[in-house]
Amino acid sequence: MKDMDFVTLLGLVAGTLTTISFLPQAIKTYKSRSTKDISLEMFGLFTVGVFLWLVYGLYINSLPIILANAVTFVLAFIILVLKLKHG
């Protein structure tokens, strides 16, 4: 296995694990419609940061960064929208 293949695989595994970690929160928030314990400021900043990581990944053409941040952005955006909608 080439070094670059291992590095890409490492990035994909890391991105998958950190991205999957948001799935339970997104599902719980969607089902309960309760966002009272989620900080709007934190999630707003986080969502913008993830979006910027996605733009960065696109700019440098890094598949692990693009995939992980695209999925994380969608999940974080859903939670942020629910937070704005349900306070």
Image (cartoon, helix red, strand yellow):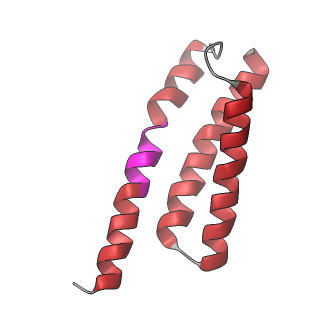
Quadrant of the image occupied by residue 37: top right
Q: Which residue sits furthest bottom?
A: 2
Q: Is residue 60 above or below residue 77?
A: below
Residue at (68%, 50%) from the top-left corner?
Answer: 49
- At x 67%, y 23%, the residue is 39
Q: Is residue 65 above or below residue 59?
A: above
In this rendering, the answer to whether 73 lies above or below 32 is: below
Instruction: Pick the quarter of the image with the C terminus.
Output: top right
- Residue 20 sits inside the magenta stretch: yes
For the stretch drawn in magenta, the main secondary structure is helix
The number of numbered discs placed on residues in the rendered structure image is: 0
Decide: is 11 above or below 15. below
At a point 29% along the width and 84% down the height, the residue shown is 3
Lateral position of residue 37 relative to residue 67, left or right: right
For the N terminus, give its image quadrant. Answer: bottom left
- Judge whether residue 17 is colored magenta: yes
| Residue beneath the point at 50% across and 27% down | 25
| Percent of width and height locating residue 19 | 47, 47
Furthest toward the right, the residue is 84
Q: Position of residue 8 (x, y in %)?
A: 38, 73
Q: Residue 24: x, y in percent?
A: 45, 29
Q: Position of residue 26 (x, y in %)?
A: 54, 30
Q: Report the span colored magenta.
A: 15-22
Q: Please tell me which residue lies in front, 40 or 27.
A: 40
